[in-house]
Amino acid sequence: MTYPQVFARLKRQRNPRNVAGMARFGINPKNTLGISIPTLRTLAKQIGSDHALAQKLWASGIHEARILASMIDEPAKVTPAQMDRWVRAFDSWDVCDQVCMNLFDKTPHAWKKAIEWSKRSREFEKRAGFALMACLAWHDQTASDAQFEKFLPLIARGATDERNFVKKAVNWALRGIGKRNRALQRAAIRAARHIAQMESRAARWVAADALRELQSATAQKKLRL
């Protein structure tokens, strides 16, 4: 599929009514067409992997085109420079999270970028660091416990950030690591208890929410299986 063909499909599927609903969930309505993620995934399957097309879709600046770009790009061809260029352009939490879970966590640069971005100051760049940690915890089945344990001090440092989109990603990363196995659950609970002692409302929320989930009966049962 060519870029003009894909762009024409996106324009035909636009739904202005959905844009207002998306805005209520904190999604940036600028350059947004109102197309659902399942619809974009169906289109991505029809297109297949296409690194060159992904670059053109990203350059369009259209919200859904950028999410679609993350679905069709080829992780092996993604460079650190591309990752930095894209992360600087993040302007909505859903684009940030979709790019991290669809593409960035599958690249060989993911671990380094998760650490690097978690130290950034800009809201969505910093969120990307923690979102990437959460996605690695979810998807990287070959990583060692030690690799994830290195994230915990960064999570503790990030937990004091009062910005909603940052603290939620910090919490997501902590919970994701704790759900991998019994050893990491214990490590994440220790980290959460440490975070709970910090003089920060955001940190206390991050800790309380993570502890509630990681210590639940459901979590205990899943990790025993």
Image: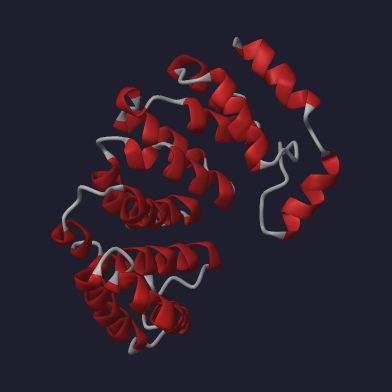
Question: Of residues 130 and 48, which is closer to you in this image?
Answer: 48
Quadrant housing the N terminus:
top right
Depicted 1 relative to depicted 10: above or below: above
Residue 131 relative to residue 145: left or right: right
Q: In the figure, residue 57 lies in which quadrant?
A: top right
| Picture coordinates of residue 162, whole percent (x, y) | 49, 73
Is residue 61 visible to us here? Answer: no
Q: How is the image coloured?
A: secondary structure
**How many numbered circles does the render carry?**
0
Residue at screen point 33% across, 22% down? 77
Residue 10 relative to residue 194: left or right: right
| Picture coordinates of residue 205, whole percent (x, y) | 47, 81
Depicted 49 relative to depicted 122: above or below: above
Is residue 107 visible to us here? Answer: yes
Taking the view exactly as shown, the residue that stands out farthest to the right is 17
Question: Of residues 46 and 110, which is closer to you in this image?
Answer: 46
Quadrant housing the C terminus:
bottom left
Residue at screen point 31% across, 35% down? 107
Q: In the figure, residue 45 lies in which quadrant?
A: top right
| Picture coordinates of residue 116, whole percent (x, y) | 28, 50
| Picture coordinates of residue 119, whole percent (x, y) | 32, 57
